[in-house]
Amino acid sequence: MDSITIVADSNISSLDAFFNASMLGQMPEQTVNIITVAGRDINAQLLADVQPDVLLIRSVTPVGEALLANNNSVKFVGSATIGTDHVDQDYLAARNITFANAAGCSKHSVAQYVLTAILTLRPQYWQQSTQPLTLGIIGLGNIGSTLAQYANELGWQVLGYDPLLPTSNTNNASLEQVLSQSDVVSLHVPLTDKDTTNPKGSDYPTKHLIDATTLAVMPAYTLLINSARGPVINARDLEADIERTDRQVVLDVFEFEPEISESLLSKLAIATPHIAGYTVEGKLRGTQIIYDALCEKLAVLPVLSMHQLLPLNTYLWSELKAHPNRLQKFYDIMHDDAALRSKLADGQIKGADFDQLRRDYHLRREWQW
């Protein structure tokens, strides 16, 4: 192979640094051609025309037969994100196409987003003298378990539910207990459905996990946060619930994303444009993981680490715990909320505006754990 052609979502961090000189430094006889495209513009015609060897995506590009049926060149697909519901892994396996995703890349970023949302809306829970917050976590994978660690550091009680994991100190409650006994419920589940190709997930479908029935179990004071996948919540049922209970709800993801209706947006306590994982560290970690996987596929040693690209970070978790009044210095979540609401026009936020906010987002920094 004299050259490698890569089609990549232009929103992947540090593409050239990882996938050009560094990756092929050990293979000087080869060249790399990186074609960057907006994630939603990666389509079957483009791949049929370009015939790339490698496809690098984030969360907005569905990958399966519809995308790859007329392509015979792709041998590796890497998703620089945690979720995999947009990728038909069975189809890729049948085509002998290697797939890698960036599991865990933004676990601290998203956990810190959730903490910021909680403490922006319920600042009293910083105080040790206050009755400790009971945090319900649905889904205890990389993000949910990391969030539980932060909650324990703050002296909060954690009620966790994950039917795919064994019982533990964190995975300690039923779904009904989490919904009915928590001050805050945070969702951290993959998107699965009864007809999913994932047999493990199909026993516990998460599409519309939060609907009129489950919302009715939650007390009106319970804050609901979704930074997982939009369709985990039935948007119509959520609107009706907020009308009835005046519940505080924080959404970073939306059922009909990238479009958001004004009727839903107007009812939310905090709304952000799917940027919970958008930190410098989270993005670089995602790129690093798929870079390492591609190097393994090509049988070359990785020669670049994300730490070589990271600017100095002075944001410390210990400092934030000692000085909670500095929360906005660490992350002003209401700025992101205002930016999203500013795009409202003609009764909705349009997909192009939603995507632009994500593309142009000024990446925040993670707190050093």
Image (spheres, rainbow, N blue to C red):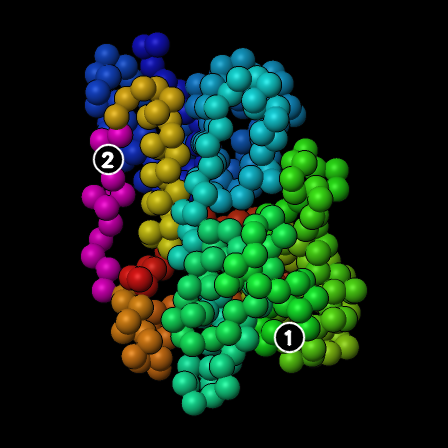
Q: Can you say which quadrant of the picture contains the N terminus?
A: top left
Outermost residue on the bottom side: it is: 129
- For residue 305, the mark is none
Instruction: Write the residue at 30% across / 34% down.
Output: 18
43 on left or right of 264: left
- Residue 334 image offset from top left, x and y in percent: 47, 71
Instruction: Write the residue at 56% across / 36% down.
Output: 61
Does residue 15 show up magenta in the picture? Answer: no
- Residue 298 image offset from top left, x and y in percent: 34, 19
Distance (Cα) linking label 1 and label 2: 46 Å
- Tell me the element at label 1: helix
- For residue 181, the mark is 1
- Residue 15 image offset from top left, x and y in percent: 34, 36
For label 2, the residue is 304
* Residue range highlighted in magenta: 302-314
Q: In which quarter of the image is residue 269?
A: bottom right
